[in-house]
Image (cartoon, rainbow, N blue to C red):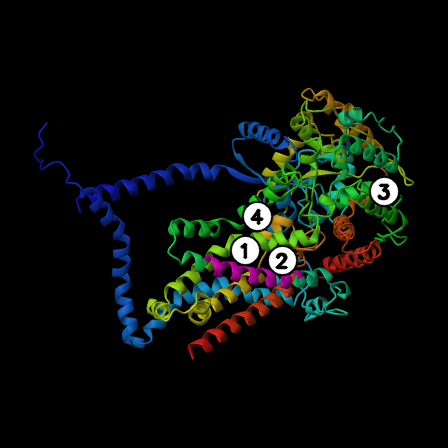
Amino acid sequence: MSDAPSAARPQPGMAEGALARVAVLPVDLALRLLDPPMRWLQRLIGARRMAYVFLLPNFAFFGLFVFLPIGINVVFSVTGGTALFPSERPYVGTEQFGYLFDCGSFLDPSSCREDHFWRGVANTAKFVAFQVTAMVLFSLVTALILNMKIRGRGIFRAVYFFPVLLSPVVVALIWKWILQRDGLLNAALTTLGGQKILFFVDPSWAMFWAVFVSVWAHMGFYTLILLAGLQAIPADLYEAAEMDATPRWRVLTRITLPLLWPNMIVVIVLALIKGAQTFDEVFVLTGGGPGTATLMVVQYIYETGFASQVQNFGLAAAASVVLGLVLFVLTLLQFAAARRKEI
Amino acid sequence: MRAVKPVIASLVLSLLSATAFSAPASAETTTIRMAWYSDGIEGEVMADLLKRFREQNKDIDVVFDQVPYKAVNENLPVQLASGQGPDIARVVDMGGLSRFALDMRPYLKDPGYWETNFGPFLEWMRPAGDTQAIPGFMTQLTVTGPFVNKTLFEQAGVAMPGEKATWEDWAKAAKEVAGKVQAPFPLAVDRSGHRFYALAMSQGTKIFGANGEPDVVDDGFKRAAQLVYDWHKSGVMSKELWGSVSGTAYRAANDEFKNAQVVMYLSGSWQIAQFAKTVDNAFDWVAVPNPCGPGGCSSMPGGGALMAFKTTQHPKEVARLMDYLASEPVLAEFYARSLFVPGHLGLAKKGIDYPTASPEAAAALKVFTASAAQVSPLAYRTQGYINSRIIFNAAISRLGQAVSGETTLEDAYKRITTDVAQQIAERNKK
């Protein structure tokens, strides 16, 4: 065997090069085919309007998978019956909305005709209030700690972010396994001489764990946003404060928090919207129980539209429209808050 | 470029050859999709029978989709309404799905055989007003009834109540046993409206008013609801089943029973195969006749039916498959291996041998077969009523709220009445 390079032997990288050429062939061909009509179009409508042409595919995609379903949902909300196709459904006007809003007092779900919807609204409001508060506080504290020069900072950042990568169903099943009658937590309690606690039978415990698990699962994402904000604060501000011997608490309240405020707004609004949409984790963890103590609006919509015997698409669609409007208002608030900060 | 050409040529060749080889096969074979849920081992048995069918009928390929029970209840109706459902499915809500049913009479070899052997059950599958259609057959006839952990009774030294014992007798005995052996669940009842009605029937509920329309909350219903409510208060029933989830969510106590945490478990005959497999020799278990009350001792009947749907593109082939599966020898084998109470009148009369059944399973099958013979006409009528599941679901959802302490029983009664009326009205909107 000779070490001398042979002319017949393929050179290293030759095969990869050939493969790469094969891979780009279709793209190259498509571009060549597209070039003449695109040039023609540009001559026809002008270069400035070409931007819209390039945006069109995305708009079409968005229209097909976002705006069209919203439209169909609105159509369903003004129809009744159990037929699936809108053309076969009788028009009922605002009857479904009237049914949802038929309440003696909006503060007392049991006085409402569709009490489950209002129990869902009340539970979601409670869940969002506790979850957003806890989420912002814990994310902030964690971000402040992870921003400090501590050993193993990279590992801690990864550890806190890891639950975000898990599927919500997996998260809920893991915690269910920990919290059930013969779960890990009760095993630990009995080992320490305590009594078993039936967490999913007591309404307060069920709501507590729904909030806790949600915060645990999503905190990493919000911590990352706040961490990015913290790292964007100019270091010279801290150096100046240090030279002035400013107390740490004052540094936090006068430098860190004001400069972190734009990120805080993003975190609060995103957490609010995501909290209002909560379904999968809580559904798998508690099934909406005990009773309806952790029944959220989205679970109500799912059960009304799909899980109940008479699949009431109209009522579910009306409830979706109401939820959509609430989320729309929250989004507007986010825009307003962001704009105010920019000014 | 020279290196690229052979690659492209081989790609094109392999594509062409794949198309050439697959085209004639797909043109000759008709594919039928069957959706199937399992309670025990019947999925394995059906897969085996279908394999045999394919060997004898090379022109029909059956795609056997084994799906969760929840998917049959929640996804299948939407699939069928959109015209995208399977050709055949094993279902429990026969009345609810009857509007999608295929009348197979024109395609069956001998519709008379079907009428003779599945007659009373065909009514459950027929659309309202139809007295002739043959949409499918019963893969099993089920009856509700309790399973008892006999070992726990022996350990506690408590005698098991006798054959005509009441629900109160059983509840008292189960509580006593649980107290002595520290079992967390004296009495468990599936969180299901159908199972609740096994109790309600025995308490004398009539379900229908004088005009034939549902009149759900009557004295018998209230007696049964009060029993369930009181049992939760006194600890006879744990809130973990009925009180821990919301709405119509189904909860069973299979795991708790097989872990010997339940003294008495009201479920039904479909559990036999599973308990025979999972409990094995861990403890002695027995099925006992449905307990009695002022309304008698009737169980609730039910079961799974294999139904064909009119959205199929291949009604002839579907009927051929159904003829094969419903034939006496095939169905006898299916019932025997799956440990099911037969839903075929001829086989029920002849009796089924269960050679693979353990002694416990064989004894349980005997008890449930006897219970099936004593099911009241009202129980059959209720099960076959097109809106029965609306009633079952309203009952379980609202009683669940009362049990968890969220509402009172009186509130639950009012809500059950309005829920049933509202859902039936919604279903009837055209």
According to the picture, the residue beneath numbered tag 1 turns out to be A215
Using the rendered view, name the quadrant where residue A251 is placed: bottom left
Q: Mark 3 or 4, which is nearer the eye?
A: 4
Q: Secondary structure at mark 1?
A: helix
Specify whether residue A243 is in view: yes
Name the mark nearer the viewer: 2 or 1. Answer: 1
Element type at mark 2: loop
Left or right: B122, with A53 as reference point: right
A141 is within the stretch colored magenta:
yes
Residue placed under numbered mark 4 in the picture: A172
The crowd level at tag 1 (other Cα within 10 Å; few <14, some 14-19, many 20+) is many
Could you tell me how far apart the alpha carbons at marks 1 and 3 are, in whole angstroms?
Answer: 46 Å
Q: Secondary structure at mark 3?
A: helix
Q: Between tags 1 and 4, which lies in front?
A: 1
Q: Looking at the image, is B320 positioned above or below residue B358?
A: below
Q: Earlier in the sequence, mark 4 or mark 2?
A: 2
Q: Chain of mark 3?
A: B
Q: Residue B175: image x %, image y %?
A: 82, 35
Task: Tell me if label 1 and label 4 are in contact, CB under 8 Å.
Answer: no
Q: Which residue is mark 3?
A: B201
Q: Nearer the viewer, residue B332 or A102?
A: A102
Location of residue B417 (image quadrant): bottom right
Q: CA distance from mark 2 to mark 3?
A: 35 Å
Name the spot of residue A312 as percent of width and height, x first. Answer: 68, 58
Q: Nearer the viewer, mark 4 or mark 2?
A: 4
Q: Which mark is residue A84?
A: 2
Region in magenta = A123-142
